[in-house]
Image: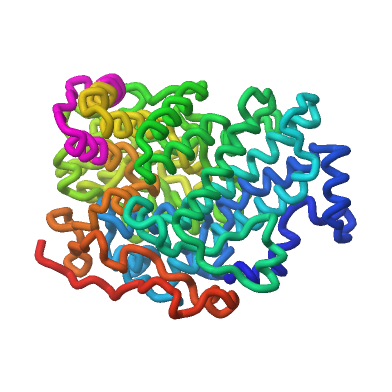
Amino acid sequence: MSIVLAGALLAGCNDLDTEPAGNTVTSDQKSDVVAVDPGKATAAVSGLTGMLDAAFTYSSDGHYDFGHPALLLMFDMRGADMYSIYSGYNWFISQQEMSEGLPTSVTPGICWTYNYNVIRAANSLLATIRPNLDMEATDETSLQTKYYFAQGSAFRAYSYFSLVQAYQFTYANNPGALAVPILTDENENEVAANGAPRATVQEVYDLIMSDLNTAIACMEGNPVTGADLVSAKANRFISLAAAYGLRARANLVMNKWSEAAADAQAAISNFSGSPLSLAEAAQPGFNSLNAKNWIWGVNVNETDRCVTTGIVNFPSHMGTFSYGYASAVGAWKWINAKLYESISTSDVRKGWWLDENGTSANLSAEQQAYCTALNVPALVQVKFAPYNGAVDTDLNASDIPLMRVEEMYLILAEAQGMQSAAQGAKTLTDFVSTYRDPYYTCTATTSQDLQNEVWRQRRIELWGEGLSYFDLLRLNKGVDRRGGGWPAETIYNIAANDPILILPIPEDEITGNKQVSAADNTNGGSIPTPVAE
């Protein structure tokens, strides 16, 4: 959907846009509402979090269409660490084939639609409360207003960060390359009338950093938190720790090592939780915002549309222990065999996948019996537990992780290591040996070797969480699936600069935005040619 055409359709999606009777409220009236009762903005902020698992936003019948978690799965399937088979019911096989390089393809369309929907909702929130924002005031109303403004800013930054990585090569390669149009609360009228050109990668990152700086400034020293808005799973909102974490990610992509290290440390310091212990990591999990190691995630309710569909959700496509596409028709999710082989037997994460005998030391007797009865193949994931731990459940209401504190330790190690290999190696050794493998020691002596080892640790630790593909892009690794176990049709060895790796601007945008033409569009490339294993 074009960012220009979407304006009329999405104008009413923010809860501040309508009165209870359904009459339209003007911008001035909305500002007055927030000034008198900032609690009215709670619904709008909550609406941002609710958009993350919205089903059938792009397609009325696409079983790949279940919000942001679907995008995480799509990008993982485009990479080199997760694969599936041609089961006949695998809705993500086109991403695995990388046959999505046309402006009319699903992946560029759904990625564009979901992220710009969030951006528009964030813009509406920001425009509504901006007139009442007073960064110096400390009264209760002003503190609440600053917190709401932080949410709008941080959610917008997250969506632009997703877009800029998907539609253009990484910042370090060419910050002047064309990325995506910039749509803000301050230029929406102009864009609606005249369209918007593709901004450069640098310009998009400038906006991302500005928004994250604003979010952090609004939350530093501010006693208002997500727990003041909801009674449970407050980390559905972006906390101060999460905002620092998002800025750490952006600085990492920009190769700003000292800034990335400082932000990762700030995220750790401002987070009240901790990494999973060795014992806690040695069992299926990753299904609840209540986990002590989740900084931020997608809150999923049992009544959400993606859940009531039964099978149009993340656990259906990813889960091994619940009913859905994985367990019912064999669309399991495997790990790259070479990556699995690189994991030490003393590392508890080895048990996040079934071994060659179809077993894992991490499973309970019930979980193992279930896998054995279904004859679940070797190297299929058992990292993600079913909802409420109920084996064979058809209630797929698991929350989805968007940021865990473990990632911050890995960012810290890499960012330190690019300045001092010895310091990075110490941080990585301390983290892995404490929380994952008691016998681990990082032996890297150069910054490049340290970065590669952190990358391997990220591939293991963050597997299935939607981060692996963008790591390939930022590190200029290309996509090498040789020896990984992929079906012969999708064994690829794709160069780091191949245009198939980035998405083209969707056709609807080219049609609806007068400042973006087919000639401006990224060449999405052709389907790669399979190579020998």
User: Considering only vertical position in the picture, is 492 above or below 27?
Assistant: below
Q: Name the side, left or right, on which 116 lies relative to 24.
A: left
Give how far across and how far down residue 127 sits, in percent: 74, 51
Q: Name the side, left or right, on which 166 lies relative to 17.
A: left
Segment colored magenta? 430-455
Q: Is residue 299 shown to the viewer in this render?
A: no
Please state which of residues 56 and 450 is positioned toward the viewer in this rendering.
Answer: 450
Question: Which residue is pictured at 86% across the width and 57% down the height?
Answer: 26
Please state which of residues 278 and 416 is positioned toward the viewer in this rendering.
Answer: 416
Question: Which residue is pictured at 55% across the width and 50% down the height?
Answer: 207
Q: Is residue 95 shown to the viewer in this render?
A: yes
Give how far across and how far down residue 218 sits, in percent: 65, 33
Q: Total marks drawn?
A: 0
User: Considering only vertical position in the picture, is 17 above or below 63?
Assistant: above
> What is the quadrant of residue 235 in the picture?
top right
Give how far across and how far down residue 482 sits, in percent: 14, 58
Question: Which residue is pictured at 48% across the width and 50% down the height?
Answer: 205
Q: Name the side, left or right, on which 437 lies relative to 167.
A: left
Quarter occupied by the N terminus: bottom right
User: Considering only vertical position in the picture, is 420 above or below 468?
Assistant: above
> What is the quadrant of residue 43 in the picture?
top right
Give how far across and how far down residue 450 sits, in percent: 21, 34
> What is the quadrant of residue 363 in the picture?
top left
